[in-house]
Image (spheres, rainbow, N blue to C red):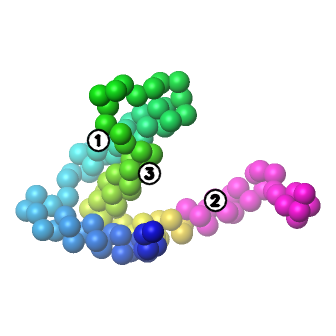
Amino acid sequence: MYNEIKMKEMQERVDQYISQFKEGYFSPLSMLARFTEEIGELAREVNHTYGEKPKKKEEKDNSIEAELGDLLFVMICFANSQNISLAEAFTKTMDKIETRDKDRWTRIDEEDLNG
């Protein structure tokens, strides 16, 4: 089982990897294109797993987990190239959602949990 690591550590690990190459991070437009490409690959896997489209015999065996990992890598690259802390971005987003959407959906009551 993998150890859970903090987002900051993930961003640092990606930066160490990218920093060893002269090319460095791709441009924002190229990264957006890569992000879109990875979302398409995730959509394809979800469609194969839960949709009506079976894989062709010659298609490689990917998983939703692998595609989410690829997507996370590209997101971290994009954030690093823009000097954005994903931990801070996540905290700000959760604060917004927890405030804005606190009464949006039906909450699970203790009675529901105890059945």
Residue denoted by label 2: 97
Picture quadrant where residue 63 is located: top left
Q: CA distance from mark 3 to mark 2?
A: 25 Å
Residue denoted by label 3: 65
Res 47 seen here: yes
Image quadrant holding the N terminus, namely bottom left
Dot 2 or dot 1: first in sequence order is 1
Q: CA distance from mark 2 to mark 1?
A: 27 Å
Identified by mark 3, the residue type is Glu
What residue is rendered at 16% in x and 68% in y?
Answer: 19
Dot 1 or dot 3: first in sequence order is 1
Count of marks, rendered view: 3
At label 2, counting other C-alpha atoms closer than 10 Å, the crowd grade (few under 14, some 14-19, many 20 or more) is few
> How far across and down, in percent of the image, does residue 20 sit?
12, 68
Could you say whether the residue bearing mark 3 is in a helix, strand or loop? helix
| Looking at the image, residue 10 lies above or below residue 59 | below
**Magenta region:** 93-115
What residue is rendered at 10% in x and 58% in y?
Answer: 23
Could you say whether the residue bearing mark 1 is in a helix, strand or loop? helix
| Looking at the image, residue 1 lies above or below residue 28 | below
Picture quadrant where residue 112 is located: bottom right
Q: As rendered, which of 53 and 30 lies closer to the eye?
A: 53
Res 39 seen here: no
Residue lying farthest front? 57
**Drawn side of residue 21 relative to residue 67, left or right:** left
Residue denoted by label 1: 33
